[in-house]
């Protein structure tokens, strides 16, 4: 099947998610209490799908660090548990995997749904342990977001319901409101991650490109993200919003305020469990959009740099990460979209950039 635009990917997402049995309420776990804007896009896609499409009430939401068994059971009774999507099924981000396995082991008396994930285990024993846990659950549905991961999951988690689906951030396609950007730049952004998913060949590579700006998600420049302890929330919020996101970048602050005030979805957040979580993620989405939109072209090694560029119809180049996640997603869903290219050999980035710029100008 040829998928030539992001709208068709969203259709595939909705077709896959439509296989979930309806429910009135749920718990939504694994909130991203860290600065990775991509994970907040995933969270928001899940929140908006659960509330707007499934019409389910999110009666409990938590990160893996502030999860409370008592609060979960008090607020949700035997309602389904929904686990956030991403690249967390595996042993690369092992803290996340251990949390997922803990929840699946503990709550076998209620349905559990894992939103679209990539699967990557470096250690076969860890995969086998996960398989034993997952296959012991009587009602576990796992959405998988690329063909390579789907093959692994189908073979290992053979007692579970495995469904292929694109990343749930594509549900945001009709919810994005592009912020006002005064004087967009004639620059190229190299949107480069620098964590354990970094491709080592890219770390010290110098691109021979004019007007090149190199930065990761802008949120990594802030000293405080979402506070991990509620007692420090006010101080952290004041420092982040007034200084880091206000006085140092006033144009972004003004744009974000306008964008948030015109947001019709803020009423939805006010009715959810812990509204501040979802509102903060929404403000981070603005920061990600504003960051990418300033540049005429983006080169990214982040999967959600790629996905956000797709949602914004922003010309871009996708580079591999440390394993097959980005390439597998591209090959599964986005390889036929004309305004993006996957470049595996970093020495070919300059030629690919010139081709895309010529297509824009032509």
Image (tube, rainbow, N blue to C red):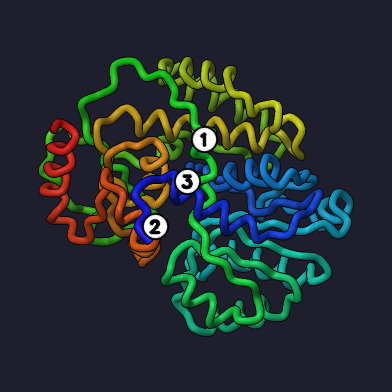
Going from N to C along the chain, the mark reached first, 2 or 1, is 1
Please give the name of the residue rendered at 59% of the width and 78% of the height, measured from the top-left corner.
157
Q: Is residue 272 visible?
A: yes
Numbered disc 1: secondary structure: helix
Where does the image place residue 274, in percent across and percent down from the top left?
74, 37
The extreme front residue here reads 1
- Residue 38 is labelled as 3
Name the quadrant containing residue 190: top left
Along the horizontal axis of the image, is 178 left or right of 94? left
Left or right: residue 258 compared with residue 349: right
Q: Earlier in the sequence, mark 3 or mark 2?
A: 3
As measured in the structure, the alpha-carbon distance from the residue carrying label 3 to the one carrying label 1 is 17 Å
Helix or strand or loop: what does disc 3 sit on? Answer: helix
**Residue 144: image location, x then y, percent:** 52, 65
| Image spot of residue 40 (x, y percent) | 54, 43
- Please name the residue that numbered disc 1 is placed on: 174
Quadrant of residue 208 in the image?
A: top left
- The residue lying toward the viewer, choosing from 130 and 174, is 174
Asked if the residue under mark 2 is in contact with the one under mark 3, i.e. CB atoms within 8 Å, the reply is no
Figure check: 175 above or below 319: above
For label 2, the SS is helix
Residue denoted by label 2: 333
Q: Residue at x 80, y 45 (%)?
A: 59
Going from the N terminus, do you reach mark 3 or mark 1 first?
Answer: 3
């Amino acid at each position: 099947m040829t998928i030539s635009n992001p709208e068709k990917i969203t259709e595939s997402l909705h077709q896959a998610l439509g296989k979930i049995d309806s429910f009135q309420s749920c718990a939504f776990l694994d909130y991203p209490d860290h600065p990775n804007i991509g994970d907040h896009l995933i969270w928001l896609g899940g929140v908006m799908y659960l509330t707007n499409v499934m019409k389910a009430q999110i009666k409990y939401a938590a990160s893996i660090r502030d999860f409370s068994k008592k609060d979960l059971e008090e607020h949700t009774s035997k309602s389904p548990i929904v686990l956030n999507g991403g690249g967390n099924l595996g042993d690369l981000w092992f803290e996340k995997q251990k949390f997922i396995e803990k929840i699946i082991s503990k709550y076998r008396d209620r349905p559990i749904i894992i939103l679209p994930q990539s699967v990557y285990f470096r250690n076969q024993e860890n995969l086998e342990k996960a398989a034993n846990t997952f296959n012991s659950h009587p009602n576990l549905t796992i959405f998988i977001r690329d063909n390579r991961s789907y093959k692994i999951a189908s073979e290992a988690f053979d007692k579970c319901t495995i469904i292929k689906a694109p990343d749930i951030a594509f549900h945001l396609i009709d919810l994005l409101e592009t912020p006002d950007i005064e004087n967009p730049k004639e620059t190229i952004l190299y949107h480069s991650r620098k964590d354990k998913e970094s491709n080592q060949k890219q770390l010290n590579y110098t691109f021979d490109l004019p007007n090149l700006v190199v930065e990761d998600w802008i949120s990594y420049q802030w000293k405080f993200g979402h506070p991990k302890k509620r007692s420090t929330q006010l101080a952290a919020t004041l420092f982040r919003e007034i200084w880091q996101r206000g006085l140092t970048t006033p144009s972004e602050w003004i744009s974000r305020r306008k964008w948030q005030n015109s947001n019709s979805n803020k009423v939805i957040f006010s009715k959810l469990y812990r509204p501040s979580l979802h509102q903060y993620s929404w403000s981070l989405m603005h920061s990600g959009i504003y960051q990418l939109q300033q540049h005429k072209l983006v080169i990214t090694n982040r999967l959600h740099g790629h996905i956000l560029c797709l949602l914004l119809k922003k010309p871009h180049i996708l580079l591999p990460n440390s394993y097959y996640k980005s390439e597998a997603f591209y090959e599964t869903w986005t390889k036929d979209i004309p305004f993006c290219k996957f470049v595996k050999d970093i020495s070919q980035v300059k030629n690919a950039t010139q081709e895309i710029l010529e297509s824009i100008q032509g």
